[in-house]
Amino acid sequence: MKRECRQVRGILFRLEGGWYFIDIMRVHEIIRPPELCALVSMPPFVAGVITRRGAVIPIINLRERFELPGQSPESRGRILVLALPGQRVGILADEVTGVLTLSVDSIQPPPSLMNARVAPFFIGLASDRERLISLVNIDMLLSAEERGVLDSLAVNIREDPEEGKPCS
């Protein structure tokens, strides 16, 4: 009997020296970061918002979300625009290296020593011979309450008509 080798394809990106993986089917687009519009009383994990194709997209700072040290992405940084149920959000990455295919059998559960506050954000760990890769669970990046807050931000923002420009 032939054993079926299931695989998952995703986008590999770097953040503060670590490697992260997101299912390619959930990535809408990858863009260069425009200037972000900061809003008063945003949750601390929201770096700002951008307008893109007429939509207001909140940008999540994964450093804050994952409790990592460090600054904003360098000039090579990118925003991965993700498709979540009912909305789009962006995440900041230092560098996007491309598409990677992982065997499902190579994925291990997250380590038990992982901080309980950030553990839900990860599906597991994998290795591609060169590096250890954390698989991000994008469905857990935002709670239902946080999604509601971000939805209300989008409703209350006056959009700039120029795509990708900061709102005012």
Image: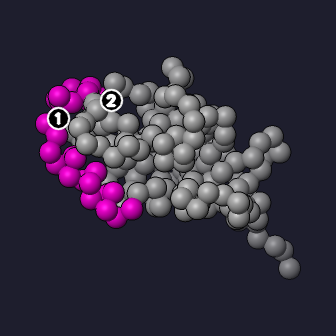
CA gap between label 1 and label 2 equals 12 Å
Quickly name the residue at label 1: 159
Which of the two marks, 1 or 2, is nearer to us in this view?
Answer: 2
Q: Is residue 161 on the magenta stretch?
A: yes
Q: Which residue does the image show at 56% across and 31% down from the upper left? A: 70
Q: Is 136 rendered above or below residue 95? A: below
* Rendered location of residue 129, percent (x, y): 83, 45
As drawn, the label of residue 36 is 2
In the rendered structure, which segment of residues is drawn in magenta?
A: 143-168
Q: Is 144 rendered above or below residue 98? A: below
Mark 1 is surrounded, within 10 Å at the Cα level, by few (under 14), some (14 to 19) or many (20 or more) other residues, namely some
For the C terminus, the image quarter is top left
- 46 relative position to 61: left or right: left
Q: Which residue does the image show at 73% across and 54% down from the upper left? A: 126
- 143 relative position to 75: left or right: left
Q: Amino acid at mark 2?
A: Leu
Q: Is 165 rendered above or below residue 22? A: above
Q: Amino acid at mark 1?
A: Glu
Helix, strand or loop status at disc 2: loop
* Rendered location of residue 155, percent (x, y): 16, 48
For the N terminus, the image quarter is bottom right
Q: Which residue does the image show at 41% across and 44% down from the upper left? A: 45
Which residue is farthest top? 75
Residue 139 appears in the rendering:
yes
